[in-house]
Amino acid sequence: MKGVVLAGGLGSRLYPLTHATNKHLLPVYDKPMVYYPIQTLVQAGINEILIVTGGPHAGDFIGVLRNGKALGVKHLEYAFQETEGGIADALSLCEDFADHESIAVILGDNTTDADIGEAVRGFGEGAMVFLREVPDPERFGVPVFDPHDPARIIAIEEKPAHPKSNYAVTGLYLYDNRVFEYIKTLEPSARGELEITDVNNAYIAQGLLRWAELKGFWSDAGTFESLFRSNVFWAQKSTGRPAEDFSSRL
């Protein structure tokens, strides 16, 4: 299985910080943000990785990541997303890199200490999404569970005003190679993007989507609040000091 880190976008929710560089290169404690999703893939045994980026600071990644060897990456590639076309549009750029293999896809602002190695090793066909219970599911794609079989997802709704569960699709996915055929059938959403939620719903329609709950810490770092939360956690984990020690000193 190969890995894809999606690290495009303008990061406008983090202005003015992202006037200076790409959001995914901002620091999370003592590392650039993008190190964390790369480490998640490498720890799962995935060492061929493609970074998809875009915007005015795309070139900054090369200076930070170089060839990836320092992070345990055997082969690192880059792809440039020319427009703000959405997550599925960014993923469409990875077809040649995947070369008919399955792929693990993680958003570049996701930080987690979860071990997904077992899921990666046991993956066959279809798709798998990783879920996490959150206090603000309306910010995410939200699974709708079958009332007769709570273990089965019957739909995923993108940023619903009235979420039907408290779970979020975390931005970490496993796909077989048919994902690229599904992307080719998509139409832009109301916000003009190709939505990854529509890809996941295509798998659901074929009975090919499974899910697992992500264990351990997980947070995106795409807002000031979640960026702060991620910094505090990783500072605590790296030093062994309690989170209160860091937050009380800020």
Image (cartoon, helix red, strand yellow):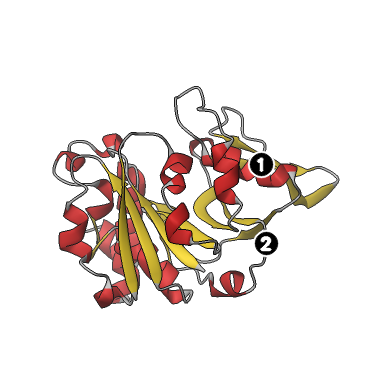
Residue furthest out toward the top: 190
Mark 1 vs 2, N-terminal side: 2
**Contact between labelled residues 2 and 1, with CB atoms less than 8 Å apart:** no
Residue at (61%, 60%) from the top-left corner? Answer: 213
Q: Position of residue 46 (x, y in %)?
A: 45, 72
The residue under label 2 is which amino acid type?
A: Glu
- Tell me if mark 2 has few (under 14), some (14-19) or many (20+) residues whose alpha carbon lies within 10 angstroms of its own: some
Q: 137 and 176: which one is in front?
A: 176
| Alpha carbon distance from label 1 to label 2 | 14 Å
> Which residue matches tag 2?
125
Q: Is residue 167 visible?
A: no
Q: Secondary structure at mark 1?
A: helix
Q: Position of residue 130 (x, y in %)?
A: 58, 56
In the figure, is residue 161 to the left or right of 147?
Answer: left
The residue under label 1 is which amino acid type?
A: Ala
Q: Quadrant of residue 96?
A: bottom left
Q: Secondary structure at mark 2?
A: loop
Reply above or below: 54 against 160.
below
Mark number displayed over residue 169: none
Q: Quadrant of residue 16?
A: top left
Q: Position of residue 238 (x, y in %)?
A: 30, 73
> Which residue matches tag 1?
202
Q: 164 and 179: which one is in front?
A: 179
